[in-house]
Image (cartoon, rainbow, N blue to C red):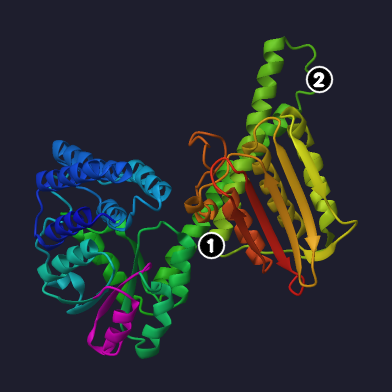
């Protein structure tokens, strides 16, 4: 990190975190200063992030609108942690997400999110002593002001080690606000330690992610509520925030939280299965019933073909979203039976043959004669179709794809290696996160961005692991999964 740039970031962050109200103009000027510093050092990506922060402050000022605390926090963390000599691609990915999410905040309310608004102390239902565990000074500062206005005292911890020390006196707290992601651990890992000392104190998790599975894991581990940092209160909206805290305090056993999550999952499944999946099936069946279209004009036949293809794509996307929802909610069930993994690979290759030929790709296949394993054939077929399909999609015309299935004393291992664009090392882990796309893929391309998330969940449900490797941009990629023989 550039020392003077690092110091300037820390100074601006302290200014924002310590002030009761930070003018947007001051934030813009500070970000412009960071942009100039980055330019003097030739740190292009750092300059782009600082410039985006300055533009965000300027736009918010002109619109008389607040800035999302979550976005502000993510931007400063990117500026603090980025090292222009090591990981430019990771910084560019952060910038891309920032640009996508910056203006997903509430309608203009006239002030910056950190502006204080008086709150009646009774709104927090007797929570007079609060413990805030979060590594973000911005989040801690915002919570400190909110509870101070409500007449409550706030103690703070910035990491898991400090939180464990605070837990020794947990009985003096009425409420714990616990960040999901901390520098040295996770909030979910801390929950059992907290609950071992107190079953009385209310615990609400804070997270930057919109993740149903994380919410369920937190509640199962002893949390009473779950609030996204993007929903932290801005002026005029603290009633909703304190209502959520009251619900958590009243639901110390987690019953209300569980009911809310179950209702959310139920509503989502109903929407997908009835409001989307059924109409897609009806469209496909209606098109099939047209039968012989030879009497149609060329344009009519083309229209029917396009509609039929679109109906199939719609059904595929709906099924993929439904699979993800089940996985995210912890409901991925396997139907295991003895299956020939070699036959599954051959079937997936046969399904993809027309695509191989269309792109003039060379496919080398290394398979044993037979390999019987106790697994969910339909789910593993999904994995194979996704990995092989990605290899075809990201390998240029005339490229080479090699597919290998091997068995050792303890493992089954499937590998697909391509001669495509390759992946930067900083992007490899991100590939298996929701809504991510491989480098070079348009954001508007077809697909949900959930394929590899589903792949990872299916493999891990079989007690296996999946991973990606690449020597870098232009060097091709290798995707592999392995299943332990003792488990399958």
x and y percentages locating residue 99 in the rendered image: 33, 41
Do the residues under discs 1 and 2 have CB atoms within 8 angstroms?
no
**One can see residue 312 in this view:** yes
Label 2: which secondary element? loop
x and y percentages locating residue 173 in the rendered image: 24, 83
**One can see residue 103 in this view:** no
Pointer 1 residue: 329
Query: Is 58 drawn above or below residue 264 in the view shown?
Result: above
Closer to us: 400 or 156: 400
Q: CA distance from mark 1 to mark 2?
A: 44 Å
Q: Read off the magenta span.
A: 157-182
Magenta run includes residue 180: yes
Q: Mark 2: give few (<14), some (14-19) or many (20+) Cα within 10 Å.
A: few
Is 267 left or right of 3, judged from the image as shown? right
Closer to us: 191 or 215: 191
Tell me the residue at 67%/12% (across/down).
Answer: 299
Tell me the residue at 46%/60% (across/down).
Answer: 212
Pointer 2 residue: 292
x and y percentages locating residue 460 in the rendered image: 63, 65
The quarter of the picture where residue 223 lies is bottom left
Magenta run includes residue 375: no
x and y percentages locating residue 104 in the rendered image: 31, 44
The quarter of the picture where residue 176 lies is bottom left
- The residue lying furthest to the top in this view is 297
Disc on the earlier residue, 1 or 2: 2
Tell me the residue at 73%/73% (across/down).
Answer: 487
Label 1: which secondary element? loop
* Circle 1 or circle 2, nearest the eye: 1
């Amino acid at each position: 990190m550039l020392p003077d740039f690092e110091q300037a970031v820390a100074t601006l962050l302290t200014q924002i975190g310590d002030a009761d109200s930070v003018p947007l103009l001051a934030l813009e000027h500070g970000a412009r200063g960071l942009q100039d510093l980055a330019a003097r050092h030739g740190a292009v990506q750092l300059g782009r992030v600082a410039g985006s922060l300055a533009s965000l402050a300027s736009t918010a000022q002109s619109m008389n609108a607040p800035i999302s605390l979550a976005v502000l926090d993510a931007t400063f963390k990117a500026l603090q942690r980025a090292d222009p000599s090591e990981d430019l691609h990771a910084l560019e990915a952060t910038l891309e997400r920032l640009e996508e999410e910056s203006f997903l905040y509430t309608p203009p309310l006239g002030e910056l999110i950190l502006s204080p608004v008086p709150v009646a102390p009774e709104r927090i239902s007797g929570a007079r002593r609060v413990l805030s565990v979060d590594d973000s000074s911005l989040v801690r500062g915002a919570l400190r002001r909110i509870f101070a206005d409500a007449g409550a005292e706030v103690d703070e911890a910035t990491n898991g080690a400090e939180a464990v020390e605070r837990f020794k006196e947990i009985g003096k707290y009425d409420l714990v606000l616990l960040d999901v992601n901390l520098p040295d651990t996770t909030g979910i890992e801390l929950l059992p330690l907290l609950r071992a000392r107190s079953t009385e104190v209310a615990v609400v998790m804070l997270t930057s992610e919109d993740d149903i599975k994380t919410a369920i894991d937190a509640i199962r581990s002893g949390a009473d509520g779950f609030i996204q940092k993007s929903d932290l209160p801005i002026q005029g909206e603290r009633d909703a925030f304190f209502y959520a805290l009251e619900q958590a305090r009243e639901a110390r056993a987690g019953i209300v939280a569980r009911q809310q999550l179950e209702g959310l999952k139920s509503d989502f499944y109903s929407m997908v299965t009835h409001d989307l999946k059924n109409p897609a099936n009806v469209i496909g069946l209606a098109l099939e019933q047209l039968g012989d279209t030879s009497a149609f004009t060329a344009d009519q036949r083309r229209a029917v073909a396009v509609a039929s293809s679109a109906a199939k794509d719609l059904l595929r996307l709906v099924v993929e979203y439904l699979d993800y929802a089940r996985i995210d909610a912890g409901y991925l069930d396997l139907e295991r039976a003895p299956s020939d993994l070699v036959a599954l690979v051959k079937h997936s290759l046969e399904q993809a043959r027309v695509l191989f030929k269309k792109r003039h790709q060379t496919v080398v296949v290394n398979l044993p004669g037979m390999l019987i394993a106790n697994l969910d054939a339909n789910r593993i077929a999904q994995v194979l179709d996704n990995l092989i399909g990605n290899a075809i999609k990201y390998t240029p015309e005339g490229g080479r794809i090699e597919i290998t299935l091997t068995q050792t004393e303890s493992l089954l291992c499937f590998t697909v290696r391509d001669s495509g664009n390759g992946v930067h090392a900083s992007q490899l882990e991100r590939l298996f996160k929701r809504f991510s796309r491989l480098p070079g893929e348009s954001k508007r391309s077809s697909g949900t961005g959930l394929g590899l998330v589903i792949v990872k969940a299916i493999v891990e449900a079989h007690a296996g692991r999946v991973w990606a490797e690449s020597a870098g941009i232009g060097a091709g990629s290798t995707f592999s999964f392995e299943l332990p023989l003792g488990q399958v």
